[in-house]
Image (cartoon, rainbow, N blue to C red):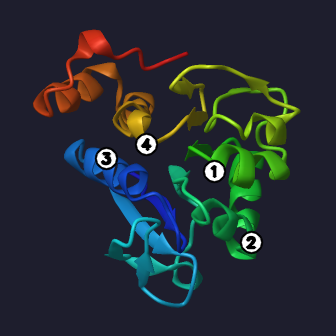
Amino acid sequence: MKKSYLFLAEGFEEIEALTVVDVMRRAGMPVVTVSVTEELEVLGAHGIKVQADAVIGDIDSEDAEWLIAPGGMPGSTNLAECDLLTTALKKHYAKGGRIAAICAAPAVVLAPLGILDGRDATCYPGFEEKCDKAVMRDTPVVALDNLITANGPASALRFALSIVANSLGEGIANEVGSGMLFYPKEVNFYF
């Protein structure tokens, strides 16, 4: 199975990042946390320090399964200002690679790159105007073939399970969700 990469910038939303990593690892998906700076330690929006697995200059995301952007402010802005990340996202998307973003990240990171153009998406309320070329949906998660977006911290578990469902199927996502007492009847993995 290919590795996925979840990118961390100072000010990231902790619940969005760590929930995704936790759920993907429970499902057996290899996911690497990546600092977008030269330091492994990254400070979240609520003062939680996280030790990333790698720094962006040391990874090769050419063959990645997923490139994932958690939200948070100023985390999303800091992700958008990382040239190595924005280049990787554009290349990955151009070849049909899978991308996921939650909260402010769809609007602040993906929309300026054209990744949401003409696509159904969601984001944190109040950021929709930055997604003027997307078809914005008022729903917690929008899961398409190679693009998953979510609206914020309360949707982090559904967002993560949608990534698992997209890669490994709804059966595995249901197993992981049930093991966390998040029952399948509550989850609609696809918009």
* Residue identified by numbered label 1: 105
Which element type, helix, strand or loop, lies under badge 1? helix
The amino acid type of the residue labelled 3 equals Met
29 on left or right of 131: left
Q: Residue at x 20, y 46 (%)?
A: 26
Which element type, helix, strand or loop, lies under badge 2? loop
Q: Sequence-wise, which precedes: disc 3 or disc 2?
A: 3
In three-dimensional space, the C-alpha distance between marks 2 and 4, rounded to whole angstroms, equals: 22 Å
* Residue identified by numbered label 3: 24
In three-dimensional space, the C-alpha distance between marks 2 and 1, rounded to whole angstroms, equals: 12 Å
The percent coordinates of residue 172 (x first, y second) are: 25, 28
* Residue identified by numbered label 4: 153
Q: Residue at x 35, y 25 (%)?
A: 169
In three-dimensional space, the C-alpha distance between marks 3 and 1, rounded to whole angstroms, equals: 19 Å
In three-dimensional space, the C-alpha distance between marks 1 and 4, rounded to whole angstroms, equals: 12 Å
Are there few (<14), some (14-19), or many (20+) residues within 10 Å of tag 2? some
Q: Residue at x 42, y 33 (%)?
A: 155
Q: Which mark is residue 81?
A: 2
Q: Which mark is residue 95?
A: none
Dividing the picture into quarters, in which one does residue 171 lie? top left
The amino acid type of the residue labelled 1 equals Ala
Q: Is residue 11 above or below residue 29?
A: below
Q: Which residue is more in the foreground, 114 or 9?
A: 9
The percent coordinates of residue 189 (x first, y second) are: 43, 20
Q: Is residue 161 above or below residue 189?
A: below
The amino acid type of the residue labelled 4 equals Pro
Are there few (<14), some (14-19), or many (20+) residues within 10 Å of tag 1? many
The percent coordinates of residue 52 (x first, y second) are: 38, 76
